[in-house]
Image: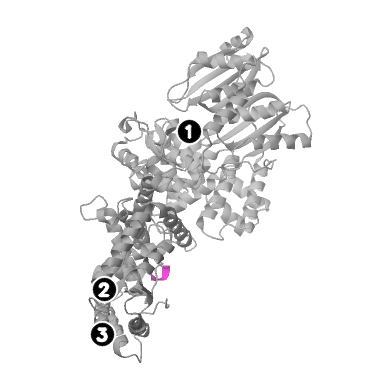
Amino acid sequence: MNAAPKLSDSGPGISGPAKDLAAARAGVLAEFSPDRPAGQEFRDRLTEAYEGWLTQRADELGITQGSGFAIVAVGALGRGETVAGSDLDLMLVHDDRFPDQLADKADGLWYPIWDSGVGLDHSVRTIPEALRVARSEATATLSLLDARYIAGDQDLASLLIASVRNLWRVEARTRLPEILDAARARWDRAGEIAQRAEPDLKNGRGGLRDVQLLNALALAQLTDGMSRFGPDGPGSEVGAAYQRLLDVRTQQHLIARRARDRVQAQDADQLAAALGLGDRFDLAREVSRSARITRFAVDTGVRTARHSVGKKGLTSRLRRLPGRRPLDEGVVEYDGEVVLARSVIPSQDAGLALRVAAASATNDLPINAGVLDRLAKYSPEIPEPWSPDTLGDLLVLLAAGRTTAPTVEALNQIGLWTRLFPEWEVIEDLPPRDAVHEWTVDRHLLETTMNAAALTTSVSRPDLLLIGALLHDIGKGRDGDHSEVGEQLARDIGTRMGLWPQDVDTLAAMVRHHLLLPEIATRRDPSDPGVVASVATTLDHDRVLVELLGALTEADSLATGPGVWSDWKATLVSRLVRNTLDLIGGDEIAPPEPLSVEQEGLAASGGVHVRLETGDGPSTYRATMVAPDTPGLLSQMAGVIALAGLATHDAQVRSHAGSAINTFVVEPAFGGPPDVQVLQQQLRAAVEGRLDVPAKLVARDSAKGEARTAVAPPKARWIDDSASGSLLLEVRAADRPGLLARITSVLERAGADVRWAKVATLGSTVVDTFCVELARDTDGARAELIDAVLRVCPGAAPGGGSPSH
């Protein structure tokens, strides 16, 4: 295929048919200014000019009805979407009756096109040869589905077109994996269109080729396609988005004066003005919104196609019906998608949408399109302030990593995300004003959040890190300094979420000062005592805030663009954070609160006791477990809690009168709490050796499997608490059922005596502190124990993790 010509090329010195083609093309170009909308009128005129020339040339070459030769267009000309930089993508079809005429007709057709300066992609095929090509590769298959008769033997062309489409309908089910693999490879090369600063309109995800893919799947009756996208059809929004992207591409070719499918910054203002869209920021928003609509439709269409085909192609009808796997309260997995339990009524469950989103992101499963529609129509407003459960589901969604963005996008497409965060509308599809940014502002916030998810175990408040990452640029797009504007918005949002007042203050300070550390570290000496003192003063000597800003700086820089976060910058920021923390001084970790009179009485009475009381949250409970204090008891209690289907959000471990009195704040995964008598019986069986709790946990986890998303690597450290003379072990890790039982089992097997413990679950991350006495307290013993603890935590490296001291 020839290189795409510049639009000014008119082929000096050419004559005959080539000159006629160049003149026809130049005549159309002369009628349209790069500074006025060209759109469909231009595409129609250029298509007519090309077809007129091809028809005339076919007559001159004897490519006529009944001749055994036909000209068929594919690609842009086949779809009637020719733009200024489009190649002529043509096939000369023949029935092999006149092989002696083939070379003359092909040369007579191709050479004038080459000489005219118009780009050409050409082939000469019989119908069997065309079918073999259609079977050979995915791109050829999809291209041939756009085939359209231009000139010559119409019966021959019609037979080719019908044969290719019939072959596709027959083989589409078995070829679907190949087609989708090719689409994913194209997405990897071209990237996203939505929320990108310089998107590829043709090949990017959410672009023109994606709708052509959707049409191909519709042709095989695997999903709906553009046939639905009439003015009154349910997919009209997608059809309009496709036309907008096509109009932008049309104008881009005219302005660039060459084939160019990536919108570039230097052309953006002229392109926006020509299309009547104001400035480049308005253009970027229009492109991003259109691409998001297209991407959402194609993603849904691809899932529908997969379900139509099933896991075994044509034999899918022989498969057993898929089962329903519970994921959360009222949320299940069915056939690879997140759906609602049959008894769920969305209008009566304000937290359902976030629960569905959390399950989707955590398990890397898309939300069923019908479920999204029900949620959009019937989800009530979330009461303010949010409940702890609702806030917890948001944190689980934000901590999921790379699956957070597509899940938020699904909520945004149905209007639920902006109902949760009305402030989001101002930054939605807002292009960056700094060229170093590669994402729109809203996507940058999600990219930052996804980067922060990998850092949650490096801070003591992973919940505030995730929320701060989500909101740090929320003030952009408004008048004033975005950090100052964002500070107040973050304060409003944090209050709405139900954060404690001091946490709202910390969140607001994160947004206000999110640029402080990188600016100071890269412009001043991070080891200068005066510089360090000024940072500490600015941040009110708040150790937690300094720690959070250090992690946020890394997440924000990584989300900005390539090269923004470097080893040099990381070293400077890390040094500034470390020096500031050293100046502020270490934290004191308070032991658990004293026992109540009732708890002391239970301990003194001996035996095994379990009490279950309503907790502070609407679905949380406080479980108090008492038993004679023996080695291994803590892990047995935690294991019984996990086996009962209860998630542990907080725990306090204490002892009195020879008994352990351990209190757990728990939440049922589904339904109501377990029977307290059953809990007590199981605890007694474990204490008496009649219930092997670790074996039961292993068997249960093997049957259930793990969540599918990546998690932050676990971290652990020893703290020599000088105030109390105690040795503390702090563990930070992604949460999973039974984790407390696993960690305490490791400690107990190592002969460590756990004097007290404080367990906190913040979103998807646990921060657990154990006061321990080691049987052998040496540096080597400490390192070995940390390695053993890390090995049972989610996200541990093979063979264990490196301790963080």
Judge whether residue 409 is colored magenta: no
> Does residue 315 appear to the left or right of 28 in the view shown?
right
Residue indicated by mark 2: 150
Work out how far the residue at label 3 is from the one at label 1, CA to CA, in angstroms. Answer: 83 Å
Q: Are marks 3 and 2 in contact (CB under 8 Å)?
A: no
Q: Position of residue 648 (x, y in %)?
A: 54, 27
Q: Secondary structure at mark 1?
A: loop
Q: Earlier in the sequence, mark 3 or mark 2?
A: 3
Instruction: Identify which amino acid the numbered label 3 is placed on.
Output: Glu
Magenta region = 264-268
Question: In terms of depth relative to the viewer, which is nearer, 304 or 609?
Answer: 304
Other residues around mark 1 within 10 Å, as few (<14) / some (14–19) / many (≥20):
few
Name the residue beneath numbered marker 3.
60
Mark with earlier residue (1, 2): 2
SS for tag 2? strand
Give the main secondary structure, helix, strand or loop, of the magenta stretch: helix
**How far apart are the alpha carbons under marks 3 and 2?**
14 Å
684, 625: nearer the viewer: 684
Q: CA distance from mark 1 to mark 2?
A: 70 Å
Where residue 401 appears, x then y in whole percent? Answer: 51, 45
Splitting the image into 4 quarters, where does residue 431 fall? bottom left
Can you identify the residue that label 1 sits on? 500
What residue do we see at 38% from left, 80% from top?
A: 6
Q: Residue furthest top?
A: 605
